[in-house]
Amino acid sequence: MAHKSSTGEAAGRVWKQLSKSGEISVASLTKSVQLPRATVDRALGWLDKEQKINWNSKGNIDVVALTEEELNAIQ
């Protein structure tokens, strides 16, 4: 249970950062939320499963952003 809860809390931190930053590289996101990369990866998986984020690549860099629906929900 603790693992699921900590992943959910990390997903909340990641979502909040994405709402502020917009599209961001996964590496920069990891630094911004000050969590281990594995934790950020789990949080992004959670948000992806919930269809709250979009993935993109810029060259060889993975970037992530909230979906339009999520962005509209916070306005």
Image (cartoon, rainbow, N blue to C red):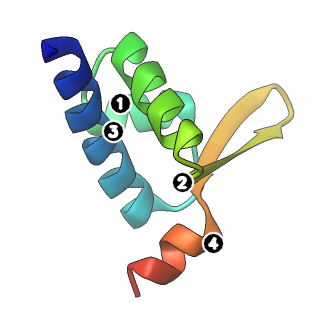
Mark 2 touches mark 1? (CB < 8 Å):
no
Q: Residue at x 18, y 26 (%)?
A: 5
Q: Secondary structure at mark 1?
A: helix
Tag 1 residue: 31
**Residue that carries the numbered disc 3 in the rendered image:** 11
What separation in Å lies between label 2 and label 1 (alpha carbons)?
21 Å
Residue 56 numbered tag: none
Sequence order check, earlier mark of 2 and 1: 1
Q: Horizontal placement of 25 versus 1: left or right?
A: right
Residue identified by numbered label 4: 68
**Residue under numbered circle 2:** 52
Q: Quadrant of the C terminus?
A: bottom left
Name which quarter of the figure residue 2 lies in. top left
Going from the N terminus, do you reach mark 4 or mark 2 first? 2
CA gap between label 4 and label 1 equals: 24 Å
Q: Secondary structure at mark 2?
A: loop
* Spot occupied by residue 46 in the image (x, y as percentages of width and height): 46, 33
